[in-house]
Image: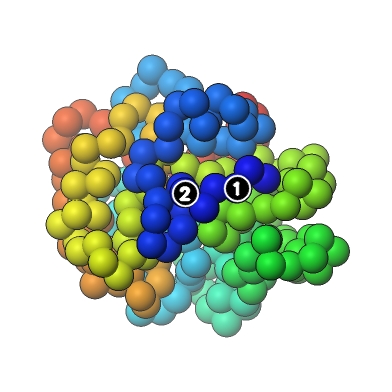
Protein backbone atom coordinates (compact mmCIF):
# COMPACT_ATOMS: atom_id res chain seq x y z
CA UNK A 1 0.00 0.00 0.00
CA UNK A 2 1.41 3.43 -0.85
CA UNK A 3 1.96 5.81 2.02
CA UNK A 4 -1.23 7.81 1.67
CA UNK A 5 -0.87 9.92 4.82
CA UNK A 6 -0.95 13.05 2.65
CA UNK A 7 -4.33 11.91 1.30
CA UNK A 8 -6.12 10.73 4.40
CA UNK A 9 -4.36 11.81 7.62
CA UNK A 10 -6.84 13.34 10.05
CA UNK A 11 -5.05 16.70 9.93
CA UNK A 12 -3.48 16.72 6.44
CA UNK A 13 -5.38 15.27 3.51
CA UNK A 14 -6.33 15.95 -0.09
CA UNK A 15 -10.01 16.36 -0.78
CA UNK A 16 -9.61 15.36 -4.43
CA UNK A 17 -7.38 12.36 -5.11
CA UNK A 18 -5.03 13.45 -7.92
CA UNK A 19 -5.36 11.54 -11.18
CA UNK A 20 -1.64 10.81 -11.04
CA UNK A 21 -2.08 8.97 -7.74
CA UNK A 22 -4.99 7.02 -9.19
CA UNK A 23 -2.91 6.08 -12.21
CA UNK A 24 0.12 5.04 -10.14
CA UNK A 25 -1.93 2.57 -8.08
CA UNK A 26 -4.55 1.21 -10.50
CA UNK A 27 -5.20 -1.92 -8.40
CA UNK A 28 -7.38 0.24 -6.13
CA UNK A 29 -10.82 1.44 -7.18
CA UNK A 30 -10.66 5.22 -6.85
CA UNK A 31 -13.62 6.06 -9.08
CA UNK A 32 -15.90 4.24 -11.51
CA UNK A 33 -15.05 4.95 -15.15
CA UNK A 34 -18.38 5.90 -16.69
CA UNK A 35 -20.03 8.42 -18.96
CA UNK A 36 -23.30 7.96 -17.13
CA UNK A 37 -24.46 10.77 -14.79
CA UNK A 38 -23.82 8.68 -11.68
CA UNK A 39 -22.19 9.38 -8.33
CA UNK A 40 -21.28 6.86 -5.65
CA UNK A 41 -21.84 7.88 -2.04
CA UNK A 42 -20.07 5.70 0.50
CA UNK A 43 -20.51 5.64 4.26
CA UNK A 44 -17.85 4.24 6.59
CA UNK A 45 -17.92 2.92 10.17
CA UNK A 46 -21.59 2.02 10.76
CA UNK A 47 -24.11 0.80 11.29
CA UNK A 48 -25.08 2.66 14.44
CA UNK A 49 -28.60 3.47 15.73
CA UNK A 50 -28.03 7.20 16.19
CA UNK A 51 -27.07 7.87 12.57
CA UNK A 52 -27.52 5.05 10.05
CA UNK A 53 -31.34 4.84 10.11
CA UNK A 54 -31.51 8.59 9.51
CA UNK A 55 -29.11 8.23 6.56
CA UNK A 56 -31.33 5.51 5.12
CA UNK A 57 -34.42 7.70 5.52
CA UNK A 58 -32.77 10.58 3.65
CA UNK A 59 -31.50 8.34 0.86
CA UNK A 60 -35.01 6.91 0.43
CA UNK A 61 -36.47 10.41 0.19
CA UNK A 62 -34.23 11.11 -2.81
CA UNK A 63 -34.53 7.62 -4.33
CA UNK A 64 -30.76 7.32 -3.90
CA UNK A 65 -28.63 4.23 -3.33
CA UNK A 66 -25.26 4.12 -1.58
CA UNK A 67 -22.55 1.77 -0.34
CA UNK A 68 -22.00 1.19 3.37
CA UNK A 69 -18.55 -0.02 4.44
CA UNK A 70 -19.51 -1.66 7.71
CA UNK A 71 -17.46 -2.44 10.79
CA UNK A 72 -18.14 -6.04 11.78
CA UNK A 73 -18.61 -5.42 15.47
CA UNK A 74 -21.28 -2.83 14.68
CA UNK A 75 -23.08 -5.29 12.42
CA UNK A 76 -22.97 -7.81 15.27
CA UNK A 77 -24.44 -5.27 17.69
CA UNK A 78 -27.09 -3.89 15.35
CA UNK A 79 -28.07 -6.64 12.90
CA UNK A 80 -31.51 -5.16 12.25
CA UNK A 81 -29.98 -1.97 10.87
CA UNK A 82 -27.63 -3.96 8.67
CA UNK A 83 -30.55 -5.99 7.35
CA UNK A 84 -32.39 -2.78 6.57
CA UNK A 85 -29.42 -1.50 4.54
CA UNK A 86 -29.49 -4.62 2.42
CA UNK A 87 -33.28 -4.83 2.18
CA UNK A 88 -33.50 -1.27 0.85
CA UNK A 89 -31.17 -2.07 -2.03
CA UNK A 90 -27.92 -0.52 -0.87
CA UNK A 91 -24.51 -2.14 -1.26
CA UNK A 92 -22.32 -3.15 1.66
CA UNK A 93 -18.59 -3.59 2.01
CA UNK A 94 -16.10 -4.94 4.55
CA UNK A 95 -14.38 -2.34 6.78
CA UNK A 96 -12.69 -4.90 9.10
CA UNK A 97 -14.28 -6.20 12.29
CA UNK A 98 -12.65 -3.71 14.68
CA UNK A 99 -11.74 -0.76 12.42
CA UNK A 100 -8.07 -1.69 12.37
CA UNK A 101 -5.24 0.46 11.05
CA UNK A 102 -3.31 -1.73 8.61
CA UNK A 103 -0.05 0.11 9.29
CA UNK A 104 -0.30 -0.68 13.00
CA UNK A 105 -1.48 -4.30 12.74
CA UNK A 106 0.54 -7.34 11.71
CA UNK A 107 -0.61 -9.03 8.55
CA UNK A 108 -2.01 -12.22 10.07
CA UNK A 109 -4.06 -10.38 12.70
CA UNK A 110 -5.34 -7.94 10.10
CA UNK A 111 -6.42 -10.61 7.65
CA UNK A 112 -8.13 -12.60 10.39
CA UNK A 113 -10.01 -9.46 11.38
CA UNK A 114 -11.15 -8.91 7.79
CA UNK A 115 -12.27 -12.54 7.61
CA UNK A 116 -14.22 -12.16 10.84
CA UNK A 117 -16.10 -9.23 9.34
CA UNK A 118 -16.70 -11.24 6.17
CA UNK A 119 -18.74 -13.74 8.19
CA UNK A 120 -21.28 -10.95 8.69
CA UNK A 121 -20.80 -8.71 5.64
CA UNK A 122 -21.11 -10.74 2.46
CA UNK A 123 -19.45 -8.57 -0.16
CA UNK A 124 -16.39 -8.53 -2.39
CA UNK A 125 -15.90 -4.81 -1.66
CA UNK A 126 -13.32 -3.83 0.94
CA UNK A 127 -12.21 -0.44 2.23
CA UNK A 128 -9.27 -0.32 4.65
CA UNK A 129 -9.87 2.00 7.61
CA UNK A 130 -7.84 5.20 7.18
CA UNK A 131 -6.98 3.98 3.66
CA UNK A 132 -4.00 2.13 5.13
CA UNK A 133 -2.69 -1.27 4.09
CA UNK A 134 0.75 -2.82 4.08
CA UNK A 135 2.00 -4.29 0.79
CA UNK A 136 1.49 -7.82 2.12
CA UNK A 137 -2.04 -7.08 3.29
CA UNK A 138 -2.90 -5.57 -0.07
CA UNK A 139 -1.38 -8.42 -2.06
CA UNK A 140 -3.51 -10.96 -0.21
CA UNK A 141 -6.76 -9.00 -0.08
CA UNK A 142 -6.83 -8.02 -3.73
CA UNK A 143 -7.09 -11.71 -4.61
CA UNK A 144 -10.54 -11.80 -3.02
CA UNK A 145 -11.77 -8.21 -2.89
CA UNK A 146 -12.07 -5.08 -4.91
CA UNK A 147 -10.21 -2.62 -2.67
CA UNK A 148 -12.16 0.63 -2.76
CA UNK A 149 -10.61 3.97 -1.87
CA UNK A 150 -12.04 7.29 -3.07
CA UNK A 151 -12.07 10.13 -5.53
CA UNK A 152 -13.52 12.76 -3.15
CA UNK A 153 -12.92 12.95 0.60
CA UNK A 154 -15.52 15.11 2.34
CA UNK A 155 -13.35 15.80 5.39
CA UNK A 156 -16.28 15.19 7.75
CA UNK A 157 -13.89 13.42 10.16
CA UNK A 158 -11.79 16.60 10.53
CA UNK A 159 -12.61 18.53 13.70
CA UNK A 160 -11.33 21.72 12.05
CA UNK A 161 -13.67 21.40 9.05
CA UNK A 162 -17.25 22.53 9.52
CA UNK A 163 -20.32 21.31 7.68
CA UNK A 164 -20.27 24.10 5.11
CA UNK A 165 -16.71 23.26 4.11
CA UNK A 166 -17.49 19.54 3.93
CA UNK A 167 -20.37 20.37 1.62
CA UNK A 168 -18.15 22.58 -0.54
CA UNK A 169 -15.52 19.83 -0.70
CA UNK A 170 -18.07 17.54 -2.32
CA UNK A 171 -19.91 20.01 -4.53
CA UNK A 172 -16.71 21.47 -5.97
CA UNK A 173 -14.92 18.19 -6.64
CA UNK A 174 -17.40 15.44 -7.45
CA UNK A 175 -17.89 14.47 -11.08
CA UNK A 176 -19.38 11.55 -12.99
CA UNK A 177 -18.12 8.32 -11.49
CA UNK A 178 -16.76 9.89 -8.30
CA UNK A 179 -16.62 7.78 -5.14
CA UNK A 180 -17.38 10.10 -2.23
CA UNK A 181 -16.53 9.33 1.40
CA UNK A 182 -18.82 10.20 4.30
CA UNK A 183 -19.07 8.57 7.73
CA UNK A 184 -22.17 7.36 9.54
CA UNK A 185 -20.73 7.63 13.03
CA UNK A 186 -21.33 9.73 16.13
CA UNK A 187 -18.38 12.07 15.57
CA UNK A 188 -19.62 13.17 12.15
CA UNK A 189 -23.37 13.07 12.77
CA UNK A 190 -23.95 16.81 13.14
CA UNK A 191 -22.11 17.58 9.89
CA UNK A 192 -23.77 14.71 8.07
CA UNK A 193 -27.24 16.00 8.91
CA UNK A 194 -26.39 19.24 7.11
CA UNK A 195 -24.30 17.85 4.26
CA UNK A 196 -26.15 14.76 3.06
CA UNK A 197 -29.52 16.32 2.15
CA UNK A 198 -27.80 19.20 0.36
CA UNK A 199 -25.53 16.90 -1.64
CA UNK A 200 -28.48 14.78 -2.71
CA UNK A 201 -30.58 17.82 -3.56
CA UNK A 202 -27.84 19.60 -5.51
CA UNK A 203 -26.76 16.73 -7.72
CA UNK A 204 -30.28 15.44 -8.26
CA UNK A 205 -31.23 18.87 -9.58
CA UNK A 206 -28.17 18.67 -11.84
CA UNK A 207 -29.54 15.47 -13.36
CA UNK A 208 -27.20 13.03 -11.62
CA UNK A 209 -28.28 9.90 -9.80
CA UNK A 210 -26.77 7.98 -6.90
CA UNK A 211 -26.05 4.27 -7.06
CA UNK A 212 -24.33 1.62 -4.99
CA UNK A 213 -20.98 0.34 -6.18
CA UNK A 214 -21.26 -2.79 -8.32
CA UNK A 215 -20.37 -5.76 -6.12
CA UNK A 216 -18.46 -7.54 -8.87
CA UNK A 217 -16.81 -4.47 -10.38
CA UNK A 218 -13.23 -4.94 -11.52
CA UNK A 219 -11.04 -2.01 -12.55
Dot 1 alpha-carbon crowd within 10 angstroms: few under 14, some 14 to 19, many 20 or more: few
Q: In the image, 176: left or right of 139?
A: left
Task: Give the residue drawn at x 21%, y 41%.
Answer: 171
Q: Are marks 2 and 1 in contact (CB under 8 Å)?
A: yes
Provide the residue designation for mark 2.
6
Q: Which mark is residue 145?
A: none
For the question of whether residue 211 can be seen, the reply is no
Picture coordinates of residue 89 (x, y %)? 47, 50
Q: Say above or below: 206 vs 54.
A: above
Picture coordinates of residue 109 (x, y %)? 81, 68
The image quadrant of residue 179 is top left
**For the C terminus, which image quadrant?**
top right
Task: Give the residue drawn at x 24%, y 54%.
Answer: 166
**Secondary-structure class at tag 2:** helix
Provide the residue designation for mark 1.
3
Picture coordinates of residue 110 (x, y %)? 76, 64
Task: Give the residue drawn at x 81%, y 60%.
Answer: 107
Dot 2 alpha-carbon crowd within 10 angstroms: few under 14, some 14 to 19, many 20 or more: few
Q: In the image, 165: left or right of 90?
A: left
Between residue 127 and residue 70, name the one nearer to us.
127
Task: Give the residue drawn at x 69%, y 67%.
Answer: 104
Q: In the image, 41: left or right of 198?
A: right
How is colour applied across the structure in the image? rainbow
**For the N terminus, which image quadrant?**
top right
**Secondary-structure class at tag 1:** loop
Amino acid sequence: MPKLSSLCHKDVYLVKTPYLVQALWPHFLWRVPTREPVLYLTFDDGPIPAVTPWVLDVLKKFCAKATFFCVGENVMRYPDIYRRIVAEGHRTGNHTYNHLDGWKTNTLDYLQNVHRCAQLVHSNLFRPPYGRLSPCQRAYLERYYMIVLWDVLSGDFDRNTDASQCLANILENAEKGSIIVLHDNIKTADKLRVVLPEVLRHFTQQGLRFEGLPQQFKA
